[in-house]
Structures are given as structure tokens and as C-alpha cells.
Amino acid sequence: MPAHPTPLRFKRLLLTGAAGGLGRELRTRLKAYCDTLRLSDIAELGDAAPGEELRPARLEDKAAVNDLLGGVDAVVHLGGVSVEAPFEPILQANIVGVFHVYEAARRHGVKRIVFASSNHVTGFYRQDEVIDTRVPVRPDGLYGLSKAFGENLAQLYFDRHGIETVCVRIGSSFAEPKDRRMLASWMSFDDLERVVVSALTAPVVGCSVIYGISDNATRWYDNSRAAHIGYRPQDSSERFRAAVEARQPALDRSDPATVYQGGAFVRTGPLE
Ligand code: 15L
């Protein structure tokens, strides 16, 4: 039963990063919204289920990415490096790679992209601040910076070429929150599906930014400027609170990971 009730079906959707943690979740869920789901990754994708097309591709390979977008109606772009890492792999997958995706979209006339951005675009805001989707970026590392580049690229391709994007600054999307920080940043997999399908199907999005979190009692993000996307989270981290707090009773307030929204990302290197 799809978590998002939409009458819209796509002929062919492309999901990049389909072998990753969130890609595997969306692989099973997005099939309900399209006739054909094209899946891409550099990691093993297994066998194609009915209605799936497997297209392994490296994002830094311009020709391969160009082929990948042929004949698709919309793209859910999760592909790339998803944690802090040295500059070279981030440069190739997240900067060169995202450019190839938008160039291919332009050439093939693809008009809607859901870009998996990250809370780490604004990770250096403090945990005692609630920010909306229009504050200046404050990346907490090279990974967050590369996602900020992707968001800016999305804006350029909307302004120049009319390609619409919803940049989803994903919080922490796991089966359950792993620590106290994630009580604020957590997004359930059902809510992940809801935000992605809302972003794919909202009639007019231009280039929008939305934070991808559940309806958590504690949160640092205000999505009111993204209400046009129609994302209505149905889950909350609250039911995990007691267990998480019991597991992590004391917080070290001198630790930057406790002070800043990006958590441990604010102190992970290497910035080389
Ligand atoms: C991210 O952007 C990562 O891809 C994910 O692995 C989590 O660490 C998440 O942020 C987070 O901030 O919890």
C-alpha cells in the first residue's frame, strides 16, 4: 500500500543511488508510482524485478549519465558520496556527477528532479536555533558543501532551462533514530516516500528546498516556506525517545557534535 496517495503515475522514473540505504527503500516503494523504474548505481543492484531496468553508471562518466536520462519523465537523484570524505571522491561524484545529471536532463528535456540534498548544507547552525529553508547555507564539511553546490546548480538549471527541482535536505533517514540528535533530525522510511512523491507530483515547484524530517516533537527545521510541496509527515521520533535517552543518558555540552545541528559531521575531516 503506497504511503502517498497520488493518482499520478509516471511512465519511467530514474532512481540513482539505488543500491544505497535510502535507494533500497525507495526501490521497492517508487514502483507503485511508475510503469518502469530505472535503477542506477555503481554498487551491485541484484536482479531486475518486473518493471525495473538496471543501468549501472558512474556519475563522473558524462556519456553514461547522458544515456541514463534518455526516455525518463523524472529523476530521483540519490547517487553520490553520502558522508564526509576526502575531496577527490566528493568532487567526482557530487560535483562533476550532479552537473552531468543536470546537463543530461537539459539535453533529454527531463523537467523534474528530486535532489537528495542534506541537513549538512546547514550543519553549522546551532541546535538552539530553528532555521527555515531560506537561511544562508552553513555547510559542516566538504560533503555539505557539495550538496550546496547541487542546490545552486538546480537553481541555475531552473532559471536558465526551466528544469524544476525539489532539493530535499534529508535529516537522518533510518529505521529508527540512533541517538539524541536524531530525535530531531529523524525521518521514517514512510515519510521519506511521502516527501519524495510529494516532490515528484506537486504541480509547480520551481526550485524549492525542503527539510526531510518526520513530525518530530523536537526539531530545528521550519518547513513552512515549502508548504506548496504538500509534504505531510505522519511519523514522529517520540516513540523512540525513552529508549534513546536511556542509551545515551549524558550529553557532553563542550562537544561541537552536541552543539551544532550537523552533529559529528562538524568535526569529521579530512578537509583535503
Ligand atoms: C547524511 O547526509 C548522511 O547521508 C546520513 O548517512 C546521515 O549521517 C545523516 O546525514 C545525518 O545527518 O544523520
Image (cartoon, rainbow, N blue to C red):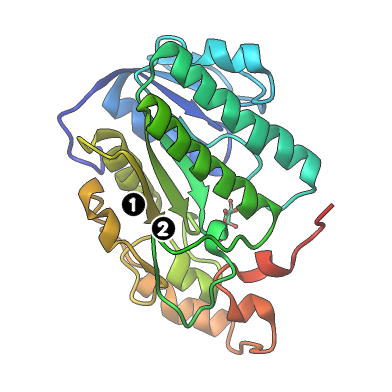
The spot of residue 211 in percent (x, y) is 40, 57
Residue under numbered circle 2: 187
Identify whether 266 is placed above or below 191: below
Identify whether 10 is placed above or below 85: above
Quarter of the image with the N terminus is top left
What's the residue type where badge 1 is placed? Answer: Asp
The spot of residue 155 in percent (x, y) is 44, 39
Q: In which quarter of the image is residue 74?
A: top left
Q: Is residue 55 visible?
A: no
Q: Residues within 10 Å of mark 2 (few under 14, many from 20)?
A: many
The circle on residue 54 is: none
Spatial CA distance of label 1 from label 2 is 6 Å
Number of numbered tags placed on the structure image: 2
What's the residue type where badge 2 is placed? Answer: Met
Q: Where ligand 1 lies, by quadrant?
A: bottom right
The spot of residue 168 in percent (x, y) is 42, 48
> Which residue lies at the image location 55% right of the left edge and 10% below the top edge?
67
Q: How crowded is mark 1: few (under 14 residues within 10 Å), some or many (20 or more)?
A: many
In the picture, measured across the screen, residue 268 lies left or right of residue 149, that is right
In the picture, measured across the screen, residue 149 lies left or right of residue 239, that is right
> Which residue lies at the image location 36% right of the left edge and 74% below the top edge?
238
> Which residue lies at the image location 28% right of the left edge and 54% below the top edge?
226
Label pair 1/2, CB-CB below 8 angstroms: yes
The spot of residue 130 in percent (x, y) is 40, 75
Q: Is residue 256 visible?
A: yes
In the picture, measured across the screen, residue 141 lies left or right of residue 33, that is right
The circle on residue 191 is: 1
